[in-house]
Structure formats: structure tokens, C-alpha cells
Amino acid sequence: QVQLVESGGGLVQAGGSLRLSCAASGSIFSINAMGWYRQAPGKQRELVATITTGGTTNYADSVKGRFTISRDNAKNTMYLQMNSLKPEDTAVYYCNARVIRVVKIDYWGQGTQVTVSS
């Protein structure tokens, strides 16, 4: 089992910045990749960014050049630095940890609200 706790959401004006954190605990040695997803009202949950244990990153086109995903293995924590925020970035942001063995298992945090005002 993997437990994930997000923090760092809030209200910010367009053009501002926020940093989200995701602290992992439990069977963290089993995690193959971690990522951030978001879900806006009335929309499906979508990928924001992912990072593998080897450090390979992947971003949604809508956030490339503005968001940076990173991880501190010593602290078992993943981050999402969000710059140049836009109103369309408003959503609940979820931390994800993926374990791939015989089957793929996804673990999710509780989510943190990010609201960008225009």
C-alpha cells in the first residue's frame, strides 16, 4: 500500500505561481512512476505531468514550459512547480503513484484545490 498526501493548493491571480507537494509513505520502494493529474468541474481527470524513478518527465502540452515536476527521494516527496498560471488551470490536483507488477495499481491522494483568478 502507498499513501499520498498533497499540499500547497490555494487561490492565486493569473500569472502567479504555486508549488504543490505530494508526500508518499508506505511501500514507496514499489513505486515505478509518480504524477500529477487534475480535474476541473464538469471535466474528466487529465494528466498534467509524470516522472519515473529514473527521472524521466512527461508533460501535457497545455502546461509545457510553465510547470515543472520533480521529486526528492530523500524526503519521499514529489513537487509540481506551477508558473504563469492561467484561469484554465483551475482544478483539483491529484497526486498519483503507479506500481507495475503483474498488474498495474494506481494510488491517489485526496486532492488539493488550485484556483486561478483572472
Image (cartoon, rainbow, N blue to C red):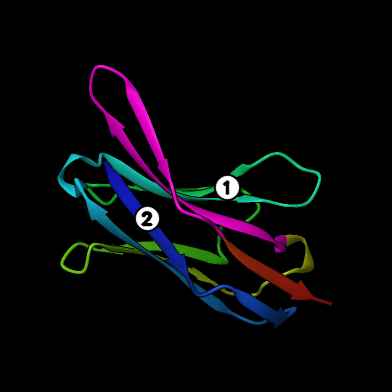
- Residue occupying the point 51% across, 55% down: 110
Where is mark 2, residue-wise?
4
First in sequence, mark 2 or 1: give its number: 2
Where is residue 66 drawn, in percent x and y?
57, 66
- Residue occupying the point 61% across, 48% down: 61
| Lateral position of residue 116 relative to residue 63, left or right | right
Q: Which residues are magenta?
A: 89-111
Where is residue 34 drawn, in percent x and y?
36, 47
Q: Is residue 58 magenta?
A: no
Viewer can see residue 58: yes
Asked where in the image residue 85 lies, by quadrant, the reply is bottom right
Within-10-Å neighbours for mark 2: few <14, some 14–19, many 20+: many
At numbered mark 1, what does the secondary structure look like: helix, strand or loop?
A: loop
Circle 2: residue type: Leu
Separation of marks 2 and 1 at Cα, in angstroms: 22 Å
| Lateral position of residue 87 relative to residue 33, left or right | right
| Lateral position of residue 116 relative to residue 27, left or right | right
- Residue occupying the point 31% across, 42% down: 33
Q: Nearer the viewer, residue 99 or 59?
A: 99
Q: Is residue 96 magenta?
A: yes
Q: Nearer the viewer, mark 2 or mark 1?
A: 2
Where is residue 30 drawn, in percent x and y?
19, 39
Where is residue 43 drawn, in percent x and y?
76, 42
Where is mark 1, residue-wise?
60
**Above or below, 19 relative to 99:** below
| Quadrant of the frame with the C terminus | bottom right
At numbered mark 2, what does the secondary structure look like: helix, strand or loop?
A: strand
**Above or below, 81 relative to 110:** below
